[in-house]
Amino acid sequence: MRKRIAASFAVAALLCACGGNSPNGSSSSANAPSDGKRVEKTVKVNVFAAASLKESFGEMEKKFEAAHPETDLVFNFAGSQELVEQIEAGAPADVVATANAKTMEALKSEGKVGETDVFASNTLVLITPKGNPAKVTGLDSSLKKAKLVVCTPKASAGGATVPCGAATAELAKKLGVTLNPVSEEQKVTDVRSKVVSGEADAGVVYRTDAVAAGKDVETIEIPGADKIVNDYPIGVLKDSKNASKAKEFVDYAKSAEGRGILAKHGFKAAKGKASGGSADGSGAPETPGATGGEAPKNK
């Protein structure tokens, strides 16, 4: 009962949030193009996305809305399993993008999402605060006296798991190491925040989080992490009230320009041909680095 009540409050809050401003503080009422004329935003598209997509989708938002001034993209970033629970509870989503296929399958099996495509992938790294004060060298004995933070590998009451937590547990098992974290978080961005603030000596996060943290962290590669890949699927909700515009954003995320943005933020793009070229739907040459390869390295 307590979980149902909590879910109801969460959905109620989302209903309010989805009727207001986007998470980055941009206005949802009108857009002012370069010619000075204001264009009323008449179409609202609610995008539910894994927390690790916040920076890349934030950049896509600016480009997409500039090309589609009548459209207001409203984002809800959270842990993938949390997104699933919110949608199951009736939250008004048009697009959903999760950090692994398993969480998306839960929505597909319930008939809530139609066709989905993998549009990006992510791998794990270890990060420490700037300067690495605890002298951590990897998932090894250097962690014995260090405060390690990870995503929780535990399943929720509904059976869903946190993708970065599941990947961390799988990686630790393959490496034959036992991790003893001081805390387990529901969102990878919370792991990153604790490391950046110095609350933790080290944290296992996605490569994209290391890129987002920039000079605030030191990045340590984990041997074998490249074999534990989280694929990110994206799709339109079947009961979307703005399915055509929702699909346009999905297509943009898979386009050459979208892939370029994803690569810039540390993702590897999904295998296969990009769909379209830019935010306005026009063809454009493939963005360098947008079809995979190494993510940018922190210095």
Image (cartoon, rainbow, N blue to C red):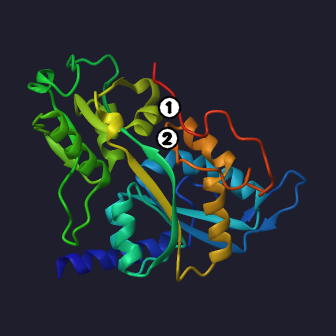
* 8 left or right, relative to 3: right
Question: Do callouts 2 and 1 mark residues in contact (Cβ within 8 Å)?
Answer: yes
Q: Is residue 165 above or below residue 298?
A: below
Does residue 292 appear in this view?
yes
The amino acid type found where label 2 is placed reads Phe
Q: Is residue 35 above or below residue 171?
A: below
Residue 29 position in % (x across, y down): 69, 67
Q: Which residue is located at x 57 percent, y 36 percent?
A: 264
Q: Is residue 149 above or below residue 1?
A: above
Looking at the rendering, which quadrant does residue 83 occupy? bottom left
As rendered, which of 240 and 117 lies closer to the eye? Answer: 117
User: According to the image, label 2 marks what residue?
Assistant: 267
Q: Which residue is located at x 28 percent, y 27 percent?
A: 223
As rendered, which of 144 and 30 lies closer to the eye? Answer: 144
As rendered, which of 123 and 155 lies closer to the eye? Answer: 123
Task: In the rendered structure, find residue 35 and report the number of the disc placed on it.
Answer: none
Residue 52 position in % (x across, y down): 43, 48
- Could you tell me which secondary element the residue under label 1 belongs to? loop
CA gap, disc 2 and disc 1: 6 Å
Q: Point out the residue furthest to the right here.
A: 35
The amino acid type found where label 1 is placed reads Ala
- Could you tell me which secondary element the residue under label 2 belongs to? loop
Q: Which residue is located at x 25 percent, y 60 percent?
A: 161
Looking at the rendering, which quadrant does residue 179 occupy? top left
Residue 150 position in % (x across, y down): 23, 42
Q: Residues within 10 Å of mark 2 (few under 14, many from 20)?
A: many
Mark 2 or 1, nearer chain start: 2
Residue 45 position in % (x across, y down): 61, 70
As rendered, which of 15 and 289 lies closer to the eye? Answer: 289
User: According to the image, label 1 marks what residue?
Assistant: 295
Q: Residues within 10 Å of mark 1 (few under 14, many from 20)?
A: some
